[in-house]
Image (cartoon, rainbow, N blue to C red):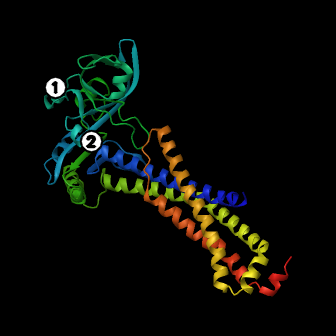
Amino acid sequence: MRTFLTMLGIMIGVAAVVMMVAAGQTVQNEITKTFDSMGTNLIIIGPAETVSGGVRGGRGRPSVSFDDVESLKSLKDVETASYVVSADAQAVYESNNYGVNIYGTTPDFLIVNNWEIDQGIMFTERDFKAGKPYIVIGQTIVNELFGLQNPVGKTLRLKGQPFTVIGTLKEKGDGLMGNDQDNIIMMPATTLRQRIRGSYRPKYTDIAFVKVTEEDKMEAVANRIEYQLRARHRLKEGADNDFMVRLMTDMVEKVRSVGFILSALLAAIASISLVVGSIGIMNMMLVSVTERTREIGTRKALGAPNRWIMFQFLTESILISFIGSFIGMLLGVALSQIGGQILDKEVPISIWSVIISVSVAVVVGVASGLMPAIKAMKLDPIEALRYQ
C-alpha cells in the first residue's frame, strides 16, 4: 500500500504531462487544419494601419480597388486573386430568420479560399458585372433556414431585398478563432454594394486575397504586389504604403509558435506533480534504508560489495518510478481520448507520450533513489548489525 501511494504521485504527474502534450498537439492540428482549409499559399492585402502621434490605430480607409485586384492576376506566379466586401444582415425565409455574414466577392473567391460547391452553381463573371441578385450559402444557413429542403432555387430576403439561392457550399467547420465558417452568404460584390451596403468608395475592397502558385514563391510575389500597387496608387519614393501586405505563411508560423509555447507552459505546470512524486519516492526509500539496516549489515558482513547494496536500492527506486510512469502514460492516453470524444476532436496518440514516460521513469528513479542508495552503501556493517 505504501509503495502504491508513493507511485500515485508519479502516475498523476505523468498522466497530467501526457494529457497536456496531447492537448497541445490537438491545438496544433486544429490550427493546421484551419489554415489548410483556407490555403497557406495566400497573400492578404488590406488597408494600411492608421498612425496618430506615433501610436498605431485600427485599419484605415479602403485603399485597394476592384481594378487593383484584377491587375494582380497578371503578375508572375499568381494563380488568381479575389476580394471581399462584407456586411451583416438577418436572413429571412418563410417564418425562419437567422443572423448571417455576407461576403460580396467574385467567382474566383472559391479558388482563392478553397471553397467547394455542394449543390447548384457559383455565380459567374457575367452575373457579377450585371449585379444579379444571386447568392451561394453555407451549410449553417442551409440547416437553420431550410432544414431538409433543397435551398437551390428558393428566395431569401436580406434587408428586405429578395435574393435567389443558386448554390450551396460544402461544410468547412469552425475557423481559427472559433467562428463558424459555414455561416456565410456569397454574392457578387457589385450586388452587395447596390442592394445591401452602400459606400462612399463603392469600388474599393475591405480585404483582398492573392493565391500564389507555389508556397516558396510567396516572398517574391509579395514584393511584386507591393511594387505594382505603389505604382497604381502613384505613391512617391519614401512615402508609406496606403495598404498592407501579409503572407499567410507568416501568420501560420506566429499562431503555431503561440500554440507551442502554450502547450509547453501547460506541460511545465503539470510537471510540478512529478517533482512531488519524486520527493515521495525519495522519502519512502530513505525510510526503507532505515527499516532494513540489519539486512544491509548482514549482507555486507557476508561479503556483499558496496555497489551491490547501492544497485539494490537504486533498482527498487527506478522500478517503482517505471511502473508508476507506465500506468500514468496509459491513464493519460485514455483520458485524452475520452476528452477528444467528448469535445468531438481528434486527439493524436504521440510517440512523445512513450518518450516522456520512459524518461521520467529513469530520471525520477535515479534522482530520488540515489541519496538513499548512497546512504545504504555507506552503512558500517558492525553498527548495522547492532541496530535495533
Contact check, label 2 and label 1, Cβ < 8 Å: no
Q: Nearer the viewer, mark 2 or mark 1?
A: 2
Quarter of the image for residue 125 reads top left
Position of 323 with respect to 3 (left or right) is left
The Cα–Cα distance between marks 2 and 1, rounded to whole angstroms, is: 24 Å
The front one of 142 and 371 is: 371
Dot 2: element: loop
Give the answer, above or below, for where 229 lies relative to 95: below
Position of 72 with respect to 193 (left or right) is left
Disc ID at residue 113: 2
Dot 1: element: helix
Q: Quadrant of the C terminus?
A: bottom right
Position of 39 with respect to 176 (left or right) is left
- What residue sits 31% from the left and 25% below the top? 196
In the picture as drawn, the residue positioned furthest to the front comes out as 302
- What residue sits 16% from the left and 46% below the top? 71
Quick check: can you spot residue 193?
no
Crowdedness of circle 2 by 10 Å Cα count: few (<14), some, many (20+)? Answer: many
Quick check: can you spot residue 61?
yes
Disc ID at residue 301: none
| Count of marks overlaid on the render | 2
Q: Quadrant of the N terminus?
A: bottom right
Q: Amino acid at mark 1?
A: Ala
- What residue sits 65% from the left and 66% below the top? 278
- Give the mark nearer the N terminus: 2 vs 1: 2
What x and y, as percent, mark residue 297? 76, 82
What x and y, as percent, mark residue 273? 64, 59
| Location of mark 1 (residue) | 130
Crowdedness of circle 1 by 10 Å Cα count: few (<14), some, many (20+)? Answer: few
